[in-house]
Amino acid sequence: MSRPIVVEAEGVVVEFGENRVLDGLSVTIAAGEAVCLIGGSGSGKTTFLRALLGLLVPSDGAIQVLGTDLLRADEEARTTAARRMGMLFQHGALLGGLTAEENVVLPLIQDSGMRPRLARSLARMRLAQVGLGEAVCHYPRELSGGMRKRAALARAVVHEPALLLCDEPSSGLDPATVVAIDELMLRLRDDIGAALVVVTHHPASVRRIADRVVYLEDGRVAADGSVAEVQSLGHPWIDGFFSEDRASDRVGLTMADVLGFPEERPAR
Amino acid sequence: MSEQAALIQATSTLHTLEGARALVEQGETEISRQRSVLVDLSRAETIGPNGAAALLALHRAASLAGVEFDLRGLSASQVRELRELPAPQIEGEPEEGFESIAHYLGGLAEEVADQFLDFLSLLAETVYWAAKRATGSGPWRRGQFVREAFAMGNEGVPIIAVVSLLVGLVTAFQAADQLRQFGASIFIANLVGLGILREMGPLVTAILVAGRSGSAMAAELGTMAVEEEIDALRVMGIDPVPYLVVPKALATLIAVPALTILADFFGVLGGFAIAVLYLGLAPDAFTAQFVAGIGPGDLLTGIAKSSLFAIVIVTVGCHFGLRLRGGAEDVGRAATNAVVTSLFLIILVDGVYVTVATLIP
């Protein structure tokens, strides 16, 4: 039996002034699926996540998230859909004036039936699960970068979202913490059964996490499949990504193209 | 390439900054004189980013001048180099002259209109959520309102007391000699009372609170926006206006009028000191004249004004913080903009208030 679709994006266009960041992006994501979004800087990965969250309004196309048409739904329906999602922002985005526990409690206080005692208990449970059982009363400024990411991850999953979005969860972390965060995301995904969408620049993370890899180029899906499938395409950027060779950054307009001298010329 | 092409010989130092500069200087001279230019690269072993930038600059200059531009003597390794070197964006040079000024002014007008609408929208949202909060609904940070009011009010006391005292002293000093000439020294009580209670007390308080707390609000919310904390709240279904702005608004609405009363007291105290110590008035005479000439209406007028100023300060500060996009340097700009805009609007509101109150008794 096929799994229900949680994200269905069709021809999504997002523009900032004259800069078209998403240019007809189409992708579907099923429940429980772990999808890694890869692509060069400016290819539209984070913009796509923000569009899924309703933080950006596309100028064209359609986005259905958890059965809600984000472009046609009213504010209340969009907010309801957003509450069924969890987001791990690139820098954690913990509220500086609140402790780790108070941050994790935040998504729960929206549930009016939730007793504060239970909300606190759930928050402490999730913090313990991410290895921060001792740091519940610490403020974000008292936590290291990896600890902040883990606290933010606890906040993203505490309300058991149906869709968990992670924007570069491993950026700025040491390799051991990257592995820990990856495993944590998968474990929490398995616990709550959410679909997982991860933007990452770490090929090892992609291999660990992804059921499916979606490669974005110029705001469109240029490759979509399992790790083996996208690697077999022979795309220079994807090859460079998985070989961790940043030569891929050089793909694009070269000086030879501009000057119009593609071949060797003898001295005249 | 025509037969009259000017030949420029790139040297072996083309890959250095010096070599690149020499090539561009020579090339620009030839481009201004000739209809076609040819650069010979046979003596340059490598091109490098500096040499490539020089060739790009000449290529651009030649195409703008309508001059033919060509290279010769490229070795296989140089071709490889050029293929490896990423080319910078060569389109989209900034426009100059009248068009760009018109474009700038148009953009500025659009930005001001956009900001004004945002400002009104935030004001309406804040009023809506504050009213909703009165009925017990909406997200709320327990104790936040008290913390904000305490920070704004308590920490502002020393500076407001000192500045108001000085303003009272200076105002009385300025008037003292003039009044004495006409034998009207006793009226210093009226002058100081009316001036401080109706005008200087609320104004000095608002200016200091805008500088201290308005900028702090813009910086705090701006930093939260930069750190994606505002987005995180929205994702969790928490509207940042009731959660962050309303406690600040209520705290400001309490703190500014309270600080204004304090400023009134110290301002009048300054005037009293000059009246007694400089003009030689009896303390009882000053007090009696003050009580006779100043009514509760004067105090209430100042407090009403200070409430309007409080609304301006909190809305402007939160507006510039919440709409901030960009990086850390924009946080400072948001704080500065919040203070400048608040001061402008405070003076504007004061002017409108005084005009309306004078024309409509």
Image: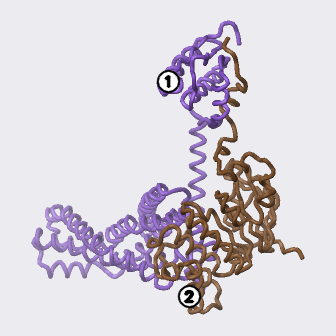
Q: Which amino acid does label 1 sit on?
A: Arg
- Rendered residue at 72%/48% (across/down): A237
Q: Name the residue under label 1.
A: B21
Chain ID for label 1?
Answer: B
Output the letter for the chain in brown: A
Q: Where is residue B294 in the image (x, y as percent from the top left)?
A: 29, 78
Image mark for residue A88: none
Chain ID for label 2?
Answer: A
State the SS at label 1.
helix
Q: Position of residue A207 (x, y in %)?
A: 71, 62
- Rendered residue at 74%/68% (across/down): A34
Closest to the observer, B122 or B137: B137
Disc 1 with disc 2 on a shared chain:
no
Residue at the right extreme of this rendering: A1
Q: Where is residue B199 in the image (x, y as percent from the top left)?
A: 34, 69
Q: In this view, does B131 lie to the left or right of B338?
A: right
State the SS at label 2.
helix
- Rendered residue at 36%/77% (across/down): B153
Q: Is residue A190 left or right of residue B335?
A: right
Q: Name the residue under label 2.
A: A120
Q: Position of residue A184 (x, y in %)?
A: 63, 74
Q: Is residue B119 visible?
A: no
Q: How crowded is mark 2: few (under 14 residues within 10 Å), some or many (20 or more)?
A: many
Output the letter for the chain in purple: B
Q: Which amino acid does label 2 sit on?
A: Arg
- Which part of the image, by quadrant, shows the C terminus of chain B? bottom left
Q: Residues within 10 Å of mark 1 (few under 14, many from 20)?
A: some
